[in-house]
Image: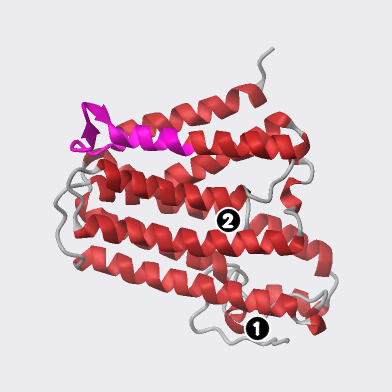
Amino acid sequence: MLTKKHVMPPLLVLVCLLYAALINPVEGRVVGVAVLPVIFAAIFAIQLLGFSYAWWARTERFYDLIGSLTFITAVLLALILNPVPSVYSYVMAALVVLWALRLGTFLFLRIADVGEDRRFRKIKQSFWHFLLVWTLQGVWVSLTSSAALVAILSPGAGPIAGVAGLGVLIWLGGLTLEVVADKQKSDFRTDPKNAGQFICCGVWTVCRHPNYLGEIMLWTGVFLAALPVMHGWQFATVLSPLFVVILLTRISGIPTLAHRGVSQWGEDPAYQAYLRDTPVLIPRLFAQRRVSKN
């Protein structure tokens, strides 16, 4: 008997393929075939291959790395399948590739150092649940990269100026914030004197999740940079930054870390003060912090 767990993976793939067909640039066709659905199909094919090995080996070590490599593969396919890619196309591809290389390497090395990703302890024991998270990674890659892919496949874009230039600057600011936040947290964790402590120094005094703020900023920047070439249904690629916001603030990311933080430090007065004085995501530009630690 078919249940939700059996139906959900193929249903998610079908919805993403329909979305790709909807936003596919008119010029984005090769021998009469819409290019963007082909790229989305390749995205999910890579996840299926990754899942097949991960299930056989019962490992999640390569999950994040394969996700990042899928982003790179998708934009390279878009460049290859665009018969006349412009400088603008290469710039948009570079925004995604640079981010993916940085994040993929960071996450892979972190998992290699720790030895496992705790999120997968139970999930990887269930075939259908494990398949679902790999399918969801395909959804993440497809939706998040959609604005960039539309821009890469669009011919004859003008110079990076105006809204597009603003988008690139926001992307740069977001990437910088994410890199700094990850580096500070990594350094904090490797210092033995901070064992069992929570981080509230550096950019982590500005908000509780500066790395996620940087992630949201950079994908918002990608969407703005892609905006000048969009028309019709392609404006639906606003789903790119919106999906990142929903993913990090409602599904994983912040909710997971908030629960873990309360479980570990909920009785600590310093942690309670940190929660009270530090905004979750959006910095208070004129607020004065009352508590400082570390």
The outermost residue toward the right is 267
* Residue 168, percent from left and from top: 32, 67
Q: Can residue 289 be spotted in the picture?
A: yes
Which residue lies under the disc numbered 2? Answer: 249
Residue 159 appears in which quarter of the rendering?
bottom left
Q: Which residues are magenta?
A: 22-43
The numbered dot on residue 181 is: none
Quick check: is 25 in the magenta stretch?
Answer: yes
Image point (19%, 43%), residue name: 83
Depth check, front residue: 69 or 281: 69
Judge from the rendering whether residue 56 lies leftward or rightward of residue 171; answer left or right: right
* Residue 172, percent from left and from top: 39, 71
Depth check, front residue: 156 or 271: 156
Q: Nearer the viewer, mark 1 or mark 2?
A: 1
Image point (69%, 34%), residue name: 129
Image point (55%, 58%), residue name: 104
Q: Amino acid at mark 2?
A: Thr
The answer to whether residue 1 is above or below residue 230 is above
- Residues at marks 1 and 2, CA–CA distance in whole angstroms: 22 Å
Which residue lies under the disc numbered 1? Answer: 201
Q: Secondary structure at mark 2?
A: helix
Judge from the rendering whether residue 244 lies leftward or rightward of residue 130; answer left or right: left
Q: Quadrant of the C terminus?
A: bottom right
Q: Can residue 239 be spotted in the picture?
A: no
Specify few, some or many for label 2: CA neighbours under 10 Å numbering under 14, 14-19, or 20 or more: some
Specify few, some or many for label 1: CA neighbours under 10 Å numbering under 14, 14-19, or 20 or more: some
Q: Secondary structure at mark 1?
A: loop
Residue 201 appears in which quarter of the rendering?
bottom right
Image point (21%, 65%), residue name: 160
* Residue 27, percent from left and from top: 18, 38
